[in-house]
Amino acid sequence: MTQLPITVRTPHPYRSPVTPPPTAPLCPQAHAGTPAPVPAAPAAVARVFGTLFVEVILTGPLPALPGWHVRLWPQARLGDATLEACPEREGGADDLRAALQAASVQALGPVRPRR
């Protein structure tokens, strides 16, 4: 009968479990009896106000677009930001694209209406 070598496996230092000291609660809110309130985002930031959306490439700060209320979102698939726009008067996708072109802002893809 062949005897197999005995190996002792020590845990990897990055995989070793870390346990908190026994005096510290894992979740202080669970011991308080009431859940902690979740801070709400300000209504002005969380609410979508625009009627048109387009991804844009910016070379600097966004210049003022006369006749449009705009807001930039840092999330974009192709460009630097997603521009959300609402016209101050009657205006559509072609008017927004013309205003962006006059302000030297490159629009990527179609100007989409809000769903």
Image (cartoon, grey):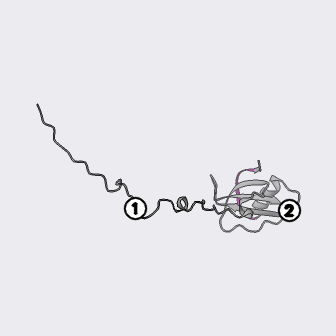
Quarter placement of the N terminus: top left
Front-lying residue, 20 or 30: 30
Label 1 SS = loop
Mark 2 nearby-residue class (10 Å; few <14, some 14–19, many ≥20): few
Residue 58 x, y percent position in the rendering: 66, 63
Q: Which mark is residue 88?
A: 2
Residue 56 sits in quarter: bottom right
**Pointers 2 and 1 in contact (C-beta within 8 Å):** no
Q: Tell me which segment is drawn in magenta.
A: 103-111
Measured Cα–Cα span from mark 2 to mark 1: 61 Å
**Residue at position x 88%, y 57% in the image:** 90
**Residue 22 has which mark?**
1
Residue plotted at (44% across, 64% down): 24
Q: At which x and y percent is residue 20?
A: 40, 61
Asked which quadrant contains residue 36, the reply is bottom right
Overall secondary structure of the magenta section = strand
**Please, which residue is most extreme toward the top here?**
1
- Residue 14 placement, left or right of 95: left
- For this rendering, which residue is in front, 80 or 45? 45
Q: Which mark is residue 13?
A: none
Name the residue furthest right.
Answer: 90
Nearest-to-viewer mark from 2 and 1: 1
Residue 95 in sight here: yes
Q: Earlier in the sequence, mark 2 or mark 1?
A: 1
Q: Is 15 situated left or right of 77 in this image? A: left
Query: Is 6 left, or right, of 41 in this rendering?
Result: left
Q: Residue at x 47, y 59 (%)?
A: 26
